[in-house]
């Protein structure tokens, strides 16, 4: 079986000592590609360095909503330039976060629009972070969709059935992470089971949100298969079918070989 971890943060300090080992464990587990996500300009530069070290690692570049208030005036221009680098296959992560109070909502909206417009200009898919902001995110996506078709994914989706339906209607993919394995997340499991197989992705968000039985420990890309195993049970299909569908979907969205 082949897997693609569509969202991980391999440049985080948690991987400083053993990034190469973590990548190798993922490869040994059948992970054929990992999308390393940038969250600041410096983070984007680090993930680009990782793409040069590891054939299986690809990059998404962008400014996370929690960090846009700390961005320098020239940072966005440099992000636009980084898009041209080899192995950049996505934009983000971007979106809206009203759980933390790190950046004013108006500024988050501005940068979200920038990522969406850059996606429409370049054809690169965008990666959406949404926390306590489902209605606002859907509104912004609908506004952009009225101008041009959307090409993106809701990362670590844990929203309502209504939000899932709205995103699917807009042509989005929904990516499920380790939270779906948590015992008390029955509502998320119910929503996840309604996602059409041809719109489903899997991710780790490593080093965060490790699936059961590793909850509370550092997550890593090899664990994507544990989340996928949970999804196979929810869908009533084999792990091979989940692997085939999610890997095909990721290749289509990110134009991976």
Image (tube, rainbow, N blue to C red):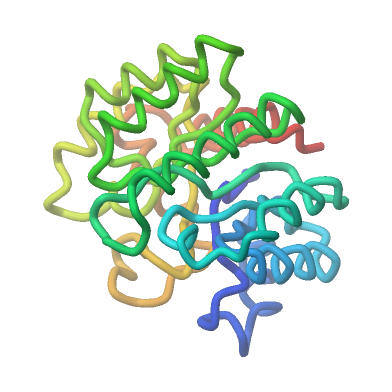
Left or right: 248 as drawn, with respect to 197: right
Q: Where is residue 135 in the image (x, y as percent from the top left)?
A: 26, 29
Q: Position of residue 118 (x, y in %)?
A: 68, 34
Pick whichever, 126 or 237, lies toward us: 126
Counting the numbered discs, the total is 0
Left or right: 187 as drawn, with respect to 18: left
Can residue 32 be seen here?
Answer: no
Picture quadrant of residue 182: bottom left
Q: Where is residue 212 in the image (x, y as percent from the top left)?
A: 29, 62
> In what quadrant of the picture does the C terminus appear?
top right
Q: Is residue 70 above or below residue 226?
A: below
Q: Residue at x 58, y 80 (%)?
A: 15
Pick whichever, 159 or 231, lies toward us: 159
Pick whichever, 243 or 16, lies toward us: 16
Picture quadrant of residue 255: top right
Q: Where is residue 153 in the image (x, y as percent from the top left)?
A: 51, 34
> In what quadrant of the picture does the N terminus appear?
top right
């Amino acid at each position: 079986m082949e897997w693609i971890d569509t969202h991980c943060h391999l440049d985080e300090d948690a991987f400083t000592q053993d990034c190469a080992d973590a990548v190798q464990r993922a490869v040994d587990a059948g992970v054929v590609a990992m999308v390393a996500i940038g969250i600041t300009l410096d983070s984007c530069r680090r993930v680009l360095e990782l793409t040069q070290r590891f054939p299986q690692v690809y990059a998404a570049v962008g400014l996370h909503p929690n960090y846009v208030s700390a961005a320098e005036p020239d940072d966005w221009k440099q992000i636009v330039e980084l898009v041209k680098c080899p192995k950049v296959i996505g934009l983000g992560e971007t979106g809206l976060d009203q759980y933390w109070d790190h950046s004013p909502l108006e500024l988050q909206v501005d940068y979200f629009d920038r990522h969406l417009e850059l996606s429409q200009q370049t054809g690169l898919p965008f990666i959406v972070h949404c926390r306590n902001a489902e209605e606002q995110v859907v509104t912004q996506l609908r506004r952009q969709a009225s101008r041009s078709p959307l090409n993106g994914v809701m990362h670590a989706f844990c929203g309502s059935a209504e939000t899932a339906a709205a995103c699917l209607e807009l042509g989005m993919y929904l990516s499920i992470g380790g939270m779906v394995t948590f015992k008390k997340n029955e509502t998320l499991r119910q929503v996840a089971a309604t996602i059409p197989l041809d719109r489903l992705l899997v991710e780790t968000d490593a080093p965060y949100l490790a699936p059961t039985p590793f909850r509370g420990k550092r997550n890593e890309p090899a664990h994507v298969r544990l989340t996928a195993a949970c999804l196979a049970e929810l869908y009533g299909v084999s792990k091979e079918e989940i692997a085939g569908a999610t890997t095909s979907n990721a290749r289509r969205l990110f134009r991976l070989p």
